Image (cartoon, rainbow, N blue to C red):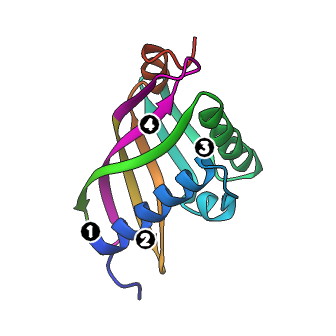
């Protein structure tokens, strides 16, 4: 029997997620396996652009690497968690509101930050916590508003 999901496990999960992201943004070697393993075999993304069901497969693995490169190329150099609000739903599920701060340097060398929230739904299976759904705001519009993408 799996021990019930605990707040400290969720905090550790997201602290590792944040550390991996920042390792990549600072030019380090990414732990792609651990990032891929942070997601369930199937997951859902919801944003103003719509709802997407995804599979944790080779295509997803490639999209993570491409995503990291995209962020680095547009000048993002840090992704920091400002706060987390954790709601334990039952013994294996939780919803977490993560307030992120994305620090960047524009092509003209001016600096800025984008603060945004992402809601994650996670499930504990055995000893592992995995994201099975997440809800985001309009990231593309926020990047446009800051002049990072056309």
- Tell me the CA gap for discs 2 and 3: 19 Å
Mark 1 neighbour class, 10 Å CA radius: few under 14, some 14 to 19, many 20 or more? few
In the image, residue 71 above or below residue 3: above
- Tell me the CA gap for discs 1 and 4: 35 Å
Of badges 3 and 4, nearer the viewer stands 4
Q: Is any atom of residue 91 visible in this view?
A: no
- Tell me the CA gap for discs 3 and 4: 28 Å
Q: Residue furthest front?
A: 109
Of the two numbered discs 3 and 4 on the same chain, state the one appearing first in sequence: 3
- The residue pinned by badge 2 equals 124
In the image, residue 70 above or below residue 90: above
Under tag 4, what secondary structure?
strand
Q: Which residues are magenta?
A: 90-115
Under tag 1, what secondary structure?
loop
Mark 4 neighbour class, 10 Å CA radius: few under 14, some 14 to 19, many 20 or more? some
Do the residues under discs 4 and 2 have CB atoms within 8 angstroms?
no
Is 140 positioned to the left or the right of 57 in the image? left
- The residue pinned by badge 4 equals 103
- The residue pinned by badge 1 equals 90
In the image, residue 92 above or below residue 107: below
Q: Which mark is residue 54?
A: 3
| Secondary structure predominantly adopted by residues drawn in magenta | strand
Mark 3 neighbour class, 10 Å CA radius: few under 14, some 14 to 19, many 20 or more? some
């Amino acid at each position: 029997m799996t021990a019930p999901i605990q707040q400290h496990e969720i905090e550790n999960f997201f602290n590792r997620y944040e550390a991996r992201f920042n390792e990549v943004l600072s030019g380090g070697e990414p732990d792609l396996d651990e990032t891929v393993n942070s997601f369930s075999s199937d997951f859902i993304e919801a944003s103003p652009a719509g709802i997407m069901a995804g599979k944790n497969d080779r295509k997803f693995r490639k999209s993570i690497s491409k995503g990291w490169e995209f962020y680095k190329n547009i000048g993002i150099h840090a992704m920091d968690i400002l706060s987390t609000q954790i709601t334990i739903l039952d013994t294996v599920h939780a919803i977490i509101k993560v307030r992120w701060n994305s620090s960047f340097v524009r092509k003209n060398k001016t600096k800025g930050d984008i603060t945004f929230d992402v809601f994650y739904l996670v499930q504990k299976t055995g000893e592992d916590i995995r994201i099975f759904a997440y809800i985001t705001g309009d990231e593309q519009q926020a990047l446009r508003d800051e002049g990072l993408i056309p």
